[in-house]
Image (tube, rainbow, N blue to C red):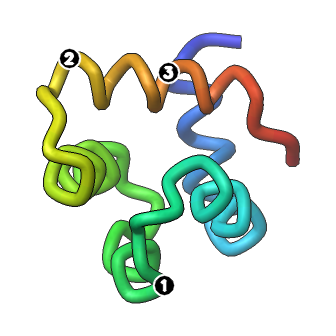
Amino acid sequence: MSTNATWNRIQGNWKQVAGSIHQQWGRLTHDDVAQIDGKRERLLGKIQERYGIAEEEANKQINDWEGQVKF
């Protein structure tokens, strides 16, 4: 499945995958996850902000997580 198709499924099931977000990135608050609202770019920015990592690393983490997320 392509990344866009995967992310479309993630967006559509955001409330269901929120728990997985918290498991993967424990520093993200419930408010952070609510603000992200299924938007990949917002998730990217929040991960960079909370963990103090570069965009490239945050993208890698998101890509790895996308491959593991269960619907």
Pointer 1: residues within 10 angstroms few (<14), some, or many (20+)?
some
Is 60 situated above or below 20?
above
Pointer 3: residues within 10 angstroms few (<14), some, or many (20+)?
few
Residue that mark 3 sits on: 63
Residue that mark 1 sits on: 30
Image point (41%, 68%), residue name: 28
Image point (29%, 49%), residue name: 47
| SS of the residue under disc 1 | helix
Q: Which residue is at the front of the view, 47 or 41?
A: 47
CA separation in Å, label 1 and label 2: 24 Å
Image point (48%, 84%), residue name: 30
Amino acid type, mark 2: Glu
Amino acid type, mark 3: Asn
| SS of the residue under disc 2 | helix
Most extreme residue toward the bottom is: 31
Amino acid type, mark 1: His
| SS of the residue under disc 3 | helix
CA separation in Å, label 3 and label 1: 21 Å
Residue that mark 2 sits on: 56
Residue 60: x, y in percent?
39, 17
Residue 70: x, y in percent?
86, 41
Instruction: Name the N-terminal-most of marks 1 and 2.
Output: 1
Residue 71: x, y in percent?
87, 48
Residue 64 placement: quadrant: top right
Image point (52%, 62%), residue name: 26
Instruction: Name the N-terminal-most of marks 3 and 1.
Output: 1
Q: Check the picture and name the quadrant holding the N terminus.
A: top right
Residue 3: x, y in percent?
53, 18
Is 58 situated above or below 18?
above
